[in-house]
Image (cartoon, rainbow, N blue to C red):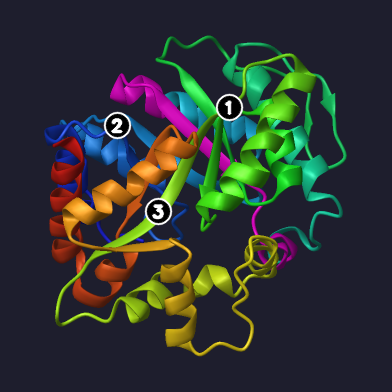
Amino acid sequence: MAHHPEQVAPFAALTRDVGAARLWMGESLLLESHQTFAYLTGRGLRPPVGTSVSLMPLRHPYKAAIEARSIAALTGQPTVAGFGPGAARLVGALRGAPYESPLTATREYMTALRALIDGRSSQLPGTYFQLHTGLPPLEHPPVELGLGVLRPAMAHLAGQVADVAITWLTPPEYLRNELIPALRKGAEEAGRRAPRVIAVIQVASAAASRDPRRLAELATRAHVAGPHYADMLRRAGVDLDGKSPLGVGAALIHHDLFITGSPDTIAGALERYTDLGVDEVILNTAGVALDEGLQVAWDECAAILTAARS
């Protein structure tokens, strides 16, 4: 999470200069992501952007729709607005109790967003989200609605209500065997095209001074500690229970959840995801950024993106 928008500007410029598809930001509890995108636009940096993922309990769908189409209008670029219900502990801290049914809450949220982004008034007397109004007309480039997906039930829902399914820490075989079929089934039942699949992949170049196991654990420790991530990983055959921090990192590397090697090796490994049906890969260099700083993380992204282009 950036402390100043100047920290994000070099990544926006890199996205533009190497012809990458999109600049992505996650939910930030420091600088709010949409406001950071607006700052970059004022600097003349206007790559396509995406959020992966904004947490539903932090904003009503009415506010979320305003933010998403505002960024599309400001940048003049297609935007991916990705959302997820968040961890039960966070939801409980913000609203007094977790969602009894995260799937129901997510369906209501996405249904409201869809109506608002499409320019329709919504009549949604939901259990978790109520909406009985619309938004004033605003011309803007397309906004794709994304949904964070970890397990088949949410993937099935994404197939019914989302334009994009965004995965995080999902092994390639699990994507192919569980999530993508669930996406397609949900879309078929809803009579619509299956969502595009976007995968966030942790990466770090190999270096003699680095222990990739440490970087892998550092980049993911906040997530793998969550029960929903632990459950997804167990379903995918990645059991981290009882492992030391370096053991966790080794397991993530073994299952291709953290890819390391030369920039060319990493670029080649990412093709495995596209071969499975992933439409867009997000490079995440958080491990390097946390350990060695943002400049080194930028260098990593530049080298890997250059290798991928060639």
In the rendered image, the vertical position of residue 173 relative to residue 144, given as above or below: below
Residue 117's place in the image compared with 214, above or below, is above
Above or below — where is 249 with respect to 160?
A: below
**How far is mark 3 from mark 2, CA to CA?**
15 Å
Query: Which label number is shown at residue 221?
Result: none
Quadrant of the drawing holding the N terminus: bottom left
Identify the mark nearer the N-term, 3 or 1. 1
**Contact? badges 1 and 2 (CB < 8 Å):** no
Q: Taking 186 as reference, is 74 left or right?
A: left
Which numbered disc, 1 or 2, marks the residue that appears first in the sequence?
2
Percent across and percent down for residue 285 are 29, 60
* Among numbered discs 3 and 2, the one appearing first in the sequence: 2
Under circle 1, the secondary element is: loop
Q: In the rendered image, which quarter contains the C terminus? A: top left
Pointer 3 local density, CA inside 10 Å: few below 14, some 14–19, many at least 20? many
Task: Kindly identify which numbered label has been placed on residue 201.
Answer: 3
For image coordinates 74% across by 14% down, the residue present is 191
Q: Could you say which is closer to the camera, residue 115 or residue 103?
A: 103
**Amino acid type shown at disc 1:** Pro
On the question of residue 160 being in view, the answer is: no
Nearer-the-camera pick, 96 or 261: 261
Quick check: can you spot residue 54? yes
Q: Which residue is mark 1?
A: 195
What residue type is disc 3 on?
Ile
Pointer 2: what residue?
Answer: 21
The residues tagged by marks 3 and 1 sit, at their Cα atoms, a distance apart of: 19 Å
Number of residues whose C-alpha sits closer than 10 Å to that of mark 2, classed few (under 14), some (14–19) or many (20 or more): some
* Distance in Å between CA atoms under marks 1 and 2: 17 Å
68 relative to 15 in the view: left or right: right
